[in-house]
Image (cartoon, grey):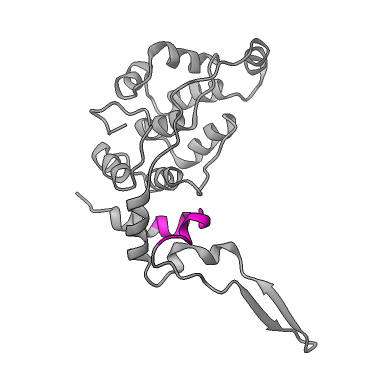
Amino acid sequence: MYDFIHDLDDYFCETYENYDKLVLLPGYKMPVMQATKVLENGRTYAYTLPSSTLKLANQEKKTEILAAAKERMVDLTFSFSFRTHSLFSQLRTKLAKYSFHKMFAKMRARYNVSDEEMLSQMDVLPEIWKGICSGKYLPTKNFIFTFALVAQISMDDTKILLQLADCAFDFRHVKDVVISYLLGTKVYNPNMIERALAEYKVGNLFFKKETAES
């Protein structure tokens, strides 16, 4: 099997944006954020470097710092309860041209995945699945992430579903970085997914145990 963890590590170092946590890691060297430039008129202009200067990829000892970061990782992004749309909200989404449940139906058809297939691989109660498909329940971010990997949908289509659910990738969260890597590089093999999630201690998704550890 292709060993992709090194590639994932490089992607994480380039992408992860929770700088408040990064700067506290052992071995992290705080970069100089202030710089000056002499303008054509001879005046000295002082400016602050962009926050991307703090990225782990810019650290000389990024491998050691990343190892320390992995030891401290804990996934606290719980979302196992599904909120119900209000009656007015359900009516509004049914009448809307673009809504999550309508696009969700199109995605399932586009990628040729059946409800039975999804329920066999996702740890979701049938009534919850039906409620999300009909627009009764609001999907969670973890639900969308799991569906995207199981149905093997593209990064662009995942972003559409997230937007319709009023959320988006947030690279301040380890989970979002890892999921974006898997989708962006089209890593859909269950064993590789399981390995990536374990490496970065990502949990609380809706995989059944035989597909990947939840």
Picture layout, residue 86 above or below residue 28: above
Q: Report whether 54 appears left or right of 86.
A: left
Would you say 208 lies left or right of 85 here? left
- Residue 67 position (above or below residue 154): below
Residue 76's spot in the image, x, y percent? 43, 37
- Give the image location of residue 204, x and y in percent: 38, 32
Secondary structure mainly formed by the magenta segment: helix
Find out whether residue 14 is within the magenta segment: yes
Residue found farthest to the right: 41
Q: Quadrant of residue 83?
A: top right
Write down the region rendered in magenta: 11-25
From this viewpoint, which residue is outermost toward the left? 1
User: Which residue does the image show at 43% across and 45% down from the upper left?
Assistant: 180
Which of the 4 image quarters holds residue 47?
bottom right
Residue at the spot 36% in from the left edge and 59% down from the top edge: 66
Quadrant into which the C terminus falls:
top left
Q: Residue at x 63, y 18 (%)?
A: 93
Q: Residue at x 52, y 64 (%)?
A: 54
| x, y percent for residue 97 | 65, 22
Q: Nearer the viewer, residue 22 or 124?
A: 22
